[in-house]
Image (cartoon, rainbow, N blue to C red):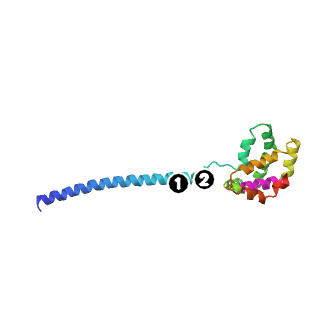
């Protein structure tokens, strides 16, 4: 072999090693970015419920409890006569695991709230009458109707006779 051939082979090897190092650095950077995006996507979409429920979604009755049980006199009446008895009955009827399953489906949650209200209508109506606040039931129903359940709310209230029965 001539010296020119050896020099060409050495130059090709040096260029090859430099090219390989550059390509491997770029490859590992791209691989790192892909893995980072994958983990970020996993945490955003699946960890603690992800973006769909942000991991801190409460059962609708608990949300209503937060709203009514800290407010003015009308809210206190709603809390005492409607929310607190319904939460008590809910905890008697369902385990914590079942409540967690319920909270993932707002349409089913509202259906269950209406069923509980219907089952306890005598207690609720007498409490509201005692406090001369029968109209608060209508406010409570309006609040339930405001809950976003992706268009299913009309079907829920049409299926449940409890709205007409409890009035």
Q: Compare residues 77 and 135 and report the one nearer the observer.
A: 135
The residue labelled by disc 1 is 42
Q: Position of residue 102 (x, y in %)?
A: 70, 55
Magenta span: chief secondary structure: helix
Q: Badge 2: how crowded within 10 Å, few (<14), some, or many (20+)?
A: few
Q: Report the front residue among 120 and 92.
A: 120
Residue under numbered circle 2 = 52
Decide whether residue 50 is among the magenta residues.
Answer: no
Disc on the earlier residue, 1 or 2: 1
48 sits left or right of 165 in the view: left
Q: Which residues are magenta?
A: 108-119
Eye-nearest disc, 1 or 2: 2
- Direction top: furthest residue: 72
Q: Answer left or right for 70 relative to 132.
A: left
Specify whether 143 is left or right of 46. Answer: right
User: Going 77% across and 56% down the picture, which residue do you hit?
Assistant: 157
Q: Would you say 134 lies left or right of 4 here?
A: right
Tell me the residue at 79%/43% (across/down): 78
């Amino acid at each position: 072999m001539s010296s020119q051939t050896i020099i060409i082979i050495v130059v090709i090897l040096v260029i090859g090693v430099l090219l390989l190092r550059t390509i491997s650095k770029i490859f590992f950077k791209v691989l790192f970015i892909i893995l980072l995006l994958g983990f970020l996507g996993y945490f955003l979409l699946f960890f603690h419920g992800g973006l769909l429920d942000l991991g801190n979604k409460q059962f609708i009755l608990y949300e209503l409890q937060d709203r009514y049980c800290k407010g003015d006199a009308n809210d206190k009446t709603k809390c005492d006569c409607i929310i607190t008895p319904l939460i008590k009955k809910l905890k008697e009827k369902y385990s914590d695991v079942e409540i967690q399953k319920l909270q993932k489906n707002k349409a089913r949650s509202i259906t269950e709230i209406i069923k509980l209200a219907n089952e306890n209508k005598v207690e609720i109506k007498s409490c509201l009458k005692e406090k001369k606040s029968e109209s608060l039931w209508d406010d409570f129903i309006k609040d339930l109707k405001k809950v976003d359940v992706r268009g299913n709310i009309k079907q829920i209230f049409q299926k449940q006779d409890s709205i007409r029965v409890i009035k």
